[in-house]
Amino acid sequence: AVAGGRSLADLGLADGAAAPSGIALQARINLETMDARGAAVPAAGILTAFEPPSGAGIRVDTFGYPGYHTTTAFDSLIAKLIVHLPGHLAGHASGAARGDLADVARKATHALSRFRIEGVATNLPFLRAVLEHADVVANRITTRFVEDHAAELARRAAELAPPAPPPSAAPAPAAPRVAPQAPPGTIAIVAPMQSKVVSISAADGDPVRPGQPVAIVEAMKMEVVVTADDGGIVRGVAARPGDIVMPGDPILFLEPAELTADEARAQTAADLDAIRADLAEVQARHAVGLDAARAAAVARRHATGRRTARENIAALVDPGSFTEYGALALAAQRRRRGLDDLIANTPADGLITGLASINSALFGPAGARCMVAAYDYTVLAGTQGYMNHKKLDRMLALAHERRLPVVLFAEGGGGRPGDTDTFGNGLDVPTFVEFARLSGLVPVIGVVAGRCFAGNAALLGCCDVIIATADSSIGMGGPAMIEGGGLGSCAPDDVGPARVQAPNGVIDVLVAGEREAAHVARQYLGYFQGPIAAWDCADQRLLRRAIPENRLRAYDIRTVLRDLADTGSVLELRAAFGAGILTALIRVEGRPLGVIANNPHHLGGAIDAPAADKAARFLQLCDAFDLPILALCDTPGFMVGPEAEKTALVRHVSRMFVTAASLTVPHLTVILRKSYGLGAMAMAGGKFHGDVFTIAWPTGELGAMGFEGAAKLGYRKELDAIADPAERRAAYDKIVARYYDEGKALNAASYAEIDAVIDPADTRRWILAGLASAAPPPPLPERRRKRPCIDPW
């Protein structure tokens, strides 16, 4: 009635009218016994006695009767015993509920003890053992109760099993079955249960090896393979397909014998080489999605100068390590396209996903694990469809649970409007937020070549780092969306080209092509996988001449960093954006670090809004994954002036202080030259006496502000009082010179403002000693992350 649309009120069951009126328990009596492992052992034969219990509150549903001959066509259920007790289940989790269960369990146990079934073994004793168990009576049970107590229950069931009836009480036996006689010197291969013979695969005279299948029998709608325990020669076949056999009935007879080596090889070779039809179908479906089976699509892709998604994955991961998930998925378009069309043209629904290892030769199998996802532009332009969202959600859950780094090849056109096998408007998709949840938990690397629009770009923007080719175009909407929004027409390559997205900070690493992109992705991930043993470096004496003696002369900070770091280990991020600060990953004696360094070629090293944003985000990245931070300081401070303030400078530069205040990783500061004011403090993590050290090279100079500005501001009254310009200039130069002398790093160290002034050639030694002395980051509770996320900007 309810299914037909009527309400409980219509049926007179509202307002408590349907309150429980008692408690019931059902016991299912099967023609089987339970072994000590909790496995069911079917029984067969003829029921010689069948007397169900009866009485108030007892019901038996059954088809059993004396003389019933068991069959192999159905399962072993012979009866259902339902026991009911009137009462009320108030507070079913309370003691009252347990009392009700105990009462009905006792009644059911008594009823089972009065259920007489003879001729075929049943689970009656096992059911009684279960219902009298103290944990069942007290309702302390789970779905694993039988598995956990199987041996104990089997022992008790054996104690409760009724004795065999005396001969005088037994009914007249049925006509005995005449079993075929075993030929002399043979052993029988017998039926394991009552069953119907489906096929026999060995004939008289055939050699049989141990473990070889010789017959198939069917019982309870399932086929069971019968195998030979010993090797030998078939000397008689006792059953035929279609025969009903009882447990222990012979199927064939075997004369024990040792097979020759040639006979054994002949028996096994065919089995190992054979491809069954079901496996062949699976292999064919997998092959359809591989590049080798898609020659036309691959050729079109190569004609554009780009690799296929599978080629990019192969270039990224360790050889042979990629295990693909969801390869058999197809586009959700079965309402508009045939299955053969979807198989041929929408393999993997345009998204290849799987688990792999990267850099295992350097970091071992455990440290090299990762998840890889690559949108396939040769399939529906790499768009995001219902099934590939579902696939990606599955992989993101694995990455989150197992803490696997993620590499995403993001090329594609965004959401796909052509899927038909879905409901709603497509907004109920967890992919984007689940992808974003990985931020700060595991390294997330985005790689793009070609066009990346809308949803694909949204995922790309959530990545810790974006590696893009020079011919890429990245945008939150493609040409169709732009034109549909009334914003005019636009060529795909003009939406967000690399020449725009690199200087504005979207792209972290700009590369020439996909080969380099895969290499950089491997290199980037390596910094977060751990230290390496092999390393080399430049002659450190080069650093003694890195900073010009003329303090007004600029120098190349990138050359300084290359000489300081292990050879070939510098990977600069966002090089074209925020030019006032360089951010890079490096190694020192194989150990990974993050570096922030002022660039004297941009505003003399002053920190403007873009540079502050760039540095603050990079500090978050390093802290999230326990990379120590090395600051190379040469700054006159924060940029000032009306034009700078138009960029919301106050808010942007303050990000460096807020971020530094939450760092848990070692922070090491080396003053190369200028170290003025708030900008220098921001570079040093907010304070000069940080958790490791603040040291300077001999060229270092420290001050609350630029010395020239300090002289003008601090001595304005005195200087204004000097009428003669030449005399005023001489006085000014004298004040500035005094400031420089007082601000020299050597003098600052004498006041303990910094920890040391060192030989630049000793910088690497100081870095390694500082890291060795630094306390490790505090441990995190299981499944926790250090930072809520890494700011996408």
Image: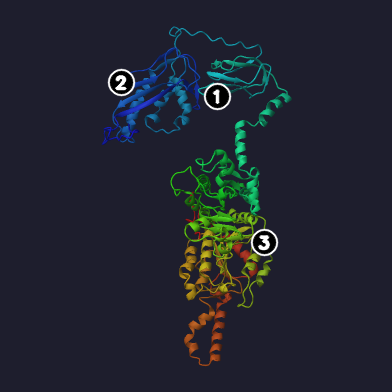
The disc at residue 408 is none
Q: Secondary structure at mark 1?
A: strand
The image shows residue 576 at horizontal and vertical percentages of 58, 65
The disc at residue 567 is 3
Q: Secondary structure at mark 2?
A: loop
- The colour scheme used here is rainbow
Q: Which amino acid is tagged 1?
A: Glu
The answer to whether 44 appears left or right of 592 in the picture is left
Q: Which amino acid is tagged 3?
A: Thr
Q: Residues within 10 Å of mark 2 (few under 14, many from 20)?
A: few
Mark 1 or mark 2: whose residue is earlier in sequence: 2
In depth, the one of 500 and 220 nearer the eye is: 500
In depth, the one of 632 and 81 nearer the eye is: 81
Q: Secondary structure at mark 3?
A: loop
The image shows residue 693 at horizontal and vertical percentages of 55, 66
The image shows residue 557 at horizontal and vertical percentages of 62, 69
Residue, disc 1: 223
The disc at residue 56 is 2
Residue 581's place in the image compared with 389, above or below, is below
Which is closer to the viewer, label 1 or label 2? 1
Q: Please say if the residues under marks 3 and 1 sit with CB atoms less than 8 Å apart.
A: no
